Amino acid sequence: MAEALFYHLTAHPLERALPDLLERTLAKGWRAVVRCGGAERMEALDRHLWTYRDESFLPHAAQGVAEPERQPIYLTTGDEVPNGADALFLVDGADTGDFEGFERVVILFSGEDPDALALARTQWKRASERVKATYWQQDGGRWTKARESVPQV
């Protein structure tokens, strides 16, 4: 059964939080799809993941690349999952109605954006009715679990 993790970004922006979460995903031997709310964000993340740290990068490709099935991390604005991803990351208003086929669905949203907060509340309600859902908030440089919901089966 999939699980949903909600990350409420208040102390650090997406560009700082996402690479760490993707590194943890790859360390598990998993593949990831990052579904972006728009092409501009996807392109910016594509550039950022190559350069976010001087001594490291995250192997990935963006939508439209040849052989997307070979990519450990695939960035997209669509619903495709060509790399058989275990984890789906939703950023900048991207949404999913389906948690099937994933071990984990990770929703990252800005605490500074009222629209993002409203969407996250809707996503939480939907997720907590279907899968185990946990809500994480930033506490300085650390993530703290603030809430958990398990669906009634």
Image (tube, rainbow, N blue to C red):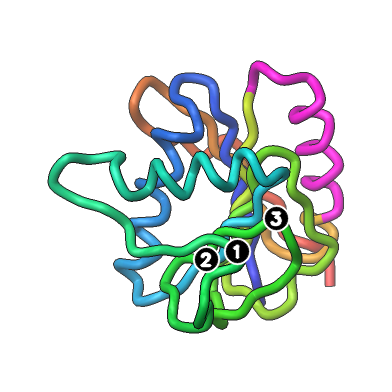
> Residue under circle 1?
63
80 sits left or right of 7 in the view: right
Which numbered disc, 2 or 1, marks the residue closer to the eye? 1
**What is the CA distance from the residue labelled 1 to the residue labelled 3?**
8 Å
Are the residues tagged 2 and 1 within 8 Å (C-beta)?
Answer: yes
Name the residue at the left extreme. Answer: 55
Instruction: State the mark number for residue 74.
Output: 2
Which mark sits nearer the N-terminus, 2 or 1? 1
Q: Is residue 19 above or below residue 67?
A: above
Front disc: 1 or 3: 1
Residue 76's place in the image compared with 112, above or below, is: below
Say which amino acid is labelled 1.
Gln
- Residue 99 picture location, percent across and down: 74, 69
Residue 145's label in the rendered image is: none
State whether the magenta stretch is mostly helix, strand or loop.
Answer: helix
Where, quadrant-wise, is the N terminus in this rendering? bottom right
Quadrant for the C terminus, please.
bottom right
Residue 117 in magenta?
A: yes
Q: Which residues are magenta?
A: 111-126
Q: Amino acid at mark 3?
A: Thr
What's the residue at 81%, 65% (across, down)?
Answer: 130
Compared to 71, does 121 lie above or below? above
Q: Categorize mark 1 by other alpha carbons within 10 Å: few (<14), some (14-19), many (20+).
A: some
Secondary structure of the residue carrying numbered label 3: loop
Residue found at x 50% / y 82%: 67
Q: Read off the residue under disc 3.
A: 77
